[in-house]
Image (cartoon, helix red, strand yellow):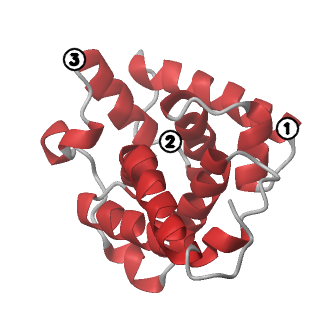
């Protein structure tokens, strides 16, 4: 990205932003939905994420991948929504018919797994979403969540164990 302060910067910046939205919109919506467990909130969080990306586009230094940077913004946006006082009153039970098309899995096993993931405690759900649903590496997840790599690995292990128990029917909703 050019650091020129000339008039040609705005069209390049806008074009770059359009590319970012086109490339990452589905994955951001997907992660926001699975994090927040509500289609409307996920759409709002996605829009808010890209608003923040646009506002901060010139300050992206490339110290991480663009995808990691965007996912970090998305996760922080979801975190803020999740911790707002009115959010506690939402019914956040997921059923397959409530899932937006962008997050739907092609088969029954995929739907059951997606629902099980959304029922995990937040700390486990975050790493599972980023690792399996977004294909991020442990070091990138650590950067997004601002935790250590061993913490990510531990949460992944506990999340896998919890999912296995849930899917085998040995664990009830919390």
Please name the residue shown 12% across and 41% down the image: 97
Task: Say above or below: 93 vs 60.
Answer: above
The residue lying at 29 percent from left, 39 percent from top is 103
Q: Residue at x 26, y 46 (%)?
A: 94
Query: Could one spot residue 16 in this view of the protein?
Result: yes
- Quarter of the rendering containing residue 166: top left
Residue occupied by mark 1? 149
Query: Can see residue 31?
Result: no
Residue nearest the observer in this picture, 47 or 85:
47
The residues bearing labels 1 and 2 have C-alpha atoms spaced at a distance of 20 Å
Residue highlighted by disc 2: 120
* Tag of residue 107: 3
Query: Could you say where residue 105 lies in the image, as x and y percent from the top left?
Result: 26, 27
Measured along the vertical axis of the image, is residue 127 above or below residue 144? above
Of tags 3 and 2, which is closer to the observer? Answer: 3
Classify mark 1: helix, strand or loop.
helix
Q: Which mark is residue 115?
A: none
Instruction: Give the structural element (helix, strand or loop) at label 3.
Output: loop
């Amino acid at each position: 990205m050019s650091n020129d302060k000339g008039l040609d910067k705005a069209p390049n910046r806008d074009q770059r932003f359009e590319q970012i939205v086109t490339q990452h919109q589905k994955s951001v919506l997907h992660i926001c939905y699975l994090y927040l467990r509500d289609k409307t909130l996920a759409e709002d969080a996605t829009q808010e994420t890209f608003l923040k990306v646009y506002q901060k586009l010139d300050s992206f230094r490339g110290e991480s991948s663009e995808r990691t940077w965007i996912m970090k913004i998305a996760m922080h946006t979801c975190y803020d929504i999740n911790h707002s006082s009115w959010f506690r009153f939402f019914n956040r039970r997921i059923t397959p018919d409530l899932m937006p098309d962008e997050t739907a899995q092609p088969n029954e096993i995929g739907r059951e797994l997606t629902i099980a993931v959304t029922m995990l405690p937040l700390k486990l759900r975050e790493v599972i979403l980023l690792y399996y649903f977004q294909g991020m590496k442990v070091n990138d997840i650590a950067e997004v969540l601002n935790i250590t790599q061993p913490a990510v690995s531990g949460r992944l292990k506990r999340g896998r164990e919890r999912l296995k128990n849930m899917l085998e029917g040995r664990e009830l909703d919390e």
